[in-house]
Image (tube, rainbow, N blue to C red):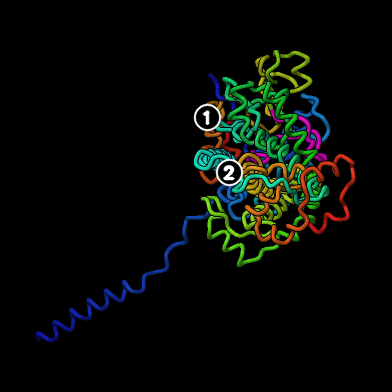
Amino acid sequence: MRIHTLLVVFCLIASVFQVQAAPPPPPPSLYTSDPGIELWNEIRQRNGEVRGVTQVKSTDADILINVSGENWRQYRMQQLIPIAGAAILIVLLTILVFRLLRGNIKLSEGRSGLKILRFTTNQRLAHWSTATLFVILGLTGLTLLLGRKFLIPVFGAEGFSNIAVVAKFLHDYLGPLFVFALTWLFVLFVRDNMPSPKLDLQWLLSGGGLFGKHAHSDRYNAGEKAWFWLAAIGGLAVIVSGLVLDFPIFGQTRATMEFYHFVHSVSAVVLIVVSFGHIYMGTAALEATFEVMQTGYCDANWAKDHHDLWYEKVKDSAQPEEQVQSVAKAGMAQRGSTDTA
Amino acid sequence: MARMKFYCDAERCIECNACVTACKNEHDIPWGVNRRRVVTIKDGEQGERSLSVACMHCSDAPCAAVCPVDCFYTTGDGIVLHDKDICIGCGYCFYACPFGAPQFPEEAAFSSRGKMDKCTFCAGGPEDDNSSEEYKKYGRNRLSEGKLPLCAEMCSTHALLAGDADVLSDIYRKRVINRGASAFEWGVNFDKAKL
């Protein structure tokens, strides 16, 4: 009797579960995705680029919403301008601190009165052409980048506009010349700037003589080589991106221009910041240095201090200062003998 | 004070391009510059929709933010205008703008673009209202005469609306209520539509 009752209860429970396990199919869902949402997803380019159809014939006219613009705005306003400004300030302050610590670094044995040819006229011409263009392009570029923040408060919007027009004009028309200047410089200087790993590493580990002791160096030390290669590679990036930006006649899209602006600005700011170090080292930091790129000749003791291994190779070509000057005055170009220097 | 806005109703726009033509004619805009354009998405497919787009006079305008010479200003009516005497034609506003509104009369070598031109909401520029100087640079100043932008004023289907943001949103809200929630699925119910 008891077992019977249990069996009946079990069957009832089982049947209930069976009913629950196989419910009738649900009615069709009322939910359908809103085509309005789909339209706006397309317009907002949420699932990749969507180009429509338009009667207007101009760059990107068939795109309703330019999604890359906001990223570019954030990059330019929140990253590029503050970081570039800070980097320039930090480097200038570092140079100032270095100046206060080390002062003007004198030749250890004073001037010898003997001159050694270090740069040919062709090399100096290439250097100063590149340098002049670099300074003009750098200043005009920085004017357009930072002028709104620092120059409009001084000159007013209309005054600054006149400056900016000139800056843009110089930047756009002189920029392509930089291609030729930098190529010229690269060809003339690349041979002696090829890395020599052991020597360069030694020089870098000793801090490059920044903190006193001079490290061994051939014609160019590792620091000069690093600047050369940075200028070559960074310069290539600046040139390629600059040409894309300067000639918007091939139907470049906004995304293309934004990308190349990113490349152009990053490489240019890096070059500008590092160039401060190069300019300081080449002018006021070390005694008897500026005259080397100015006249092409260096003092024998300068060579001994800064490029001892190179000095050992070329010390026999040293000639008295008066002789060099008289040769220069006589206008006799030393073209034939320059290549050995 | 009003907060001026454009709104284009995708359910109503029929891609007639009359707004584009009216704008060009009203402001005597040079060849190659289009302050307004109509873009059709899914042309020829199911769900095809057209929208007329110009400067949307953003509250936080990206063009004004990136301009290196700060030539943009926002009027009391929330209209974003610019000063062509200050513009240097760098093209940055065009890169940053979400709507492709800034236009340039030329696109030549050495980054020569000329002064930027864009929709003024028919409100001219910084020059004296309705002066010939203003007309030459920015076109007609209809707002100073109490008129709304011509593109919207002559839109035959009333797809393009221009005016105070509160008024526009009221109009659009009523339209949506009349059509039902999923307007794009079922289309406009013209029996119920009152506007």
- Please state the extent of the stretch shown in magenta in the rendering: B95-119
Q: Is residue A125 left or right of residue A60?
A: right
Residue B86 visible in the displayed image: yes
> For mark 2, what is the residue?
A105
Neighbor class of circle 1 (other Cα within 10 Å; few <14, some 14-19, many 20+) is few
Q: Which tag is nearer the camera, tag 2 or tag 1?
A: 2
Neighbor class of circle 2 (other Cα within 10 Å; few <14, some 14-19, many 20+) is few
Q: Mark 2 lies on which chain?
A: A
* Residue B115 among those drawn in magenta: yes
Q: What element carries label 2?
A: loop
> For mark 1, what is the residue?
B170
Classify residue A60 by image quadrant. top right
* Residue A246 among those drawn in magenta: no
Q: In this view, does A338 lie to the left or right of B154?
A: right
For image coordinates 68% across by 14% down, the residue present is B145
For image coordinates 86% across by 44% down, the residue present is A327
Residue, far left: A2
Residue type of the residue flagged with mark 2: Ile
Residue A68 visible in the displayed image: no
Classify residue B10 by image quadrant. top right
For image coordinates 51% across by 44% down, the residue present is B181
Q: Which chain carries label 1?
A: B
Quarter of the image where the N terminus of chain A is located: bottom left
Residue A187 place in picture, x, y as percent: 79, 56
- Image vertical order of residue B161 relative to residue A298, above or below: above
Residue B182 place in picture, x, y as percent: 53, 46
